[in-house]
Amino acid sequence: MKMKHVLPSLVVLALSAGGATADEETTLSIEGETLTIRADAPAHAEELDEVISGWVFRSSETQALQLDDFDNPAFVFVDQAIDEWDKVDGTEGKACSSCHENVEDFAGLRTQLPRVDGGQLVTMEELVNECRTDRMGAEPWKWTKGKMTGMTALIGLQSRGMPMNVAIDGDATPFWEDGKDLYYTRVGQLDMACANCHEDNYGNMIRADHLSQGQINGFPTYRLKNAKLNSTHARFKGCMKNIRATPYKVGGPEFKALELYLASRGQGLSVETPSVRN
Amino acid sequence: MAKGVKPRVKVPKTAAAGETITIKTLISHKMESGQRKDGDGNIIPRSIINRFTADFNGQNVIDVTLEPAISTNPYFQFEAVVPESGEFKFTWYDDDGSVYETSKKVAVE
């Protein structure tokens, strides 16, 4: 035990010289499971040395909310999704549970999405809606609305603690390249790219906000500012409005490509779904 | 009955005799204050949880009156002493007359 304490503190000394901010020794442990909140950056994230979960950048009060599943307000919506899981809907008289016996069977799915299926990039929202329209004969859910975010949180929760690991080779390469282009393209009245804040300036304050790396390993995430679960695409939209740009379409090819690229930048971080942020 | 109401409670499964335990409760409820107006300018009627109680083996532990200013999904955390094994019973009273109940057993070792 002694050794374990000695090593991280040495790391702190080395890094604090480089202007790192948040407390390097904090660990995220939920229900007895320790999550990876810092990892060596993958080779394809050339400008980063280390990938850091957004949890690290939040205040201690916000961090504490995620440590216990009872205190985590996102679980109100996860509970609603558990009810929805067994609810029959549509013309086929089926519920999710008619085909998928156990939601636990989805362990690991969240780490691999978005992925390429039959030449198309698909996200979890699209997989859920494909089930609803093609197999249940029900109306699709809206991408960013409560029923969808609750269900993607429930499915994502099954992968909590597993490392993010999306495929970016083969069929996925062109989508990944598109996402990377978007990440580095300046847009909007403020003429800013994702990278200007989340790569060049993470750890710094932008007025009252503490900039994170913009990792998406915790999505859908419960945000204190709107007291609900937020999807990745809704968050992208928020960012684009902040830089006075016209947001791309939620569920459109741009945001899907960006989602793949961002997921790949978080390679190695644990899935935290559903996380709590401000 | 208001929609989507679901009580959640966290109570330790075991405790020592006379130990003070922490209890957390949360009920999902929209807690409509009665102050807001809809798009046509009509007042949206008040619909809140107005009372919350917790009892241990029939003895009252806490009895709370809730007011309209309390926000959505009201959360209570409080402490109780458990002298013996028994059951906590939690009750929420809705404005519309609905009563939501849940209970949790504690074993004293």
Image: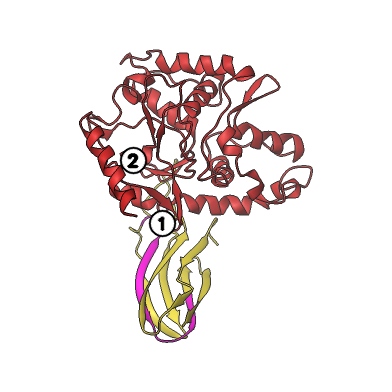
Chain colours: A red, B yellow
Q: Earlier in the sequence, mark 2 or mark 1?
A: 2
The residue pinned by badge 1 equals: A71
**SS class, disc 2:** helix
Q: Which residue lies furthest to the right in this view?
A: A92
Asked if A51 appears above or below B33 in the picture, the reply is above
Mark 2 and mark 1 on one chain: yes
Tell me, yes or no, if residue B84 can be seen here. yes
2 or 1: mark nearer the eye: 2
Crowd tier of the residue under label 1, counting other residues whose Cα lies within 10 Å: few below 14, some 14–19, many 20 or above: some
Q: Quadrant of the C terminus of chain A?
A: top left
**Mark drawn on residue A56:** 2
Please state the horizontal and vertical placement of residue A99, each as a whole percent of the image: 75, 46
* Residue at (36% x, 66% y) in the render: B77
Relative to A129, A53 lies left or right: left
Relative to A3, A179 lies left or right: right
Instruction: Please identify the dominant SS of the magenta region.
Output: strand
* Residue B75 in magenta stretch: yes
Asked if B32 appears above or below A192 in the picture, the reply is below
Asked if A151 appears above or below A236 in the picture, the reply is below
**Magenta range:** B71-89
Crowd tier of the residue under label 2, counting other residues whose Cα lies within 10 Å: few below 14, some 14–19, many 20 or above: many
The disc labelled 2 sits on which kind of residue? Val
User: Real-space Cα distance between discs 2 and 1?
Assistant: 18 Å
Please state the horizontal and vertical placement of residue A249, each as a whole percent of the image: 51, 22
The disc labelled 1 sits on which kind of residue? Asp
* Residue at (59% x, 30% y) in the render: A123
Identify the subunit bearing mark 1. A
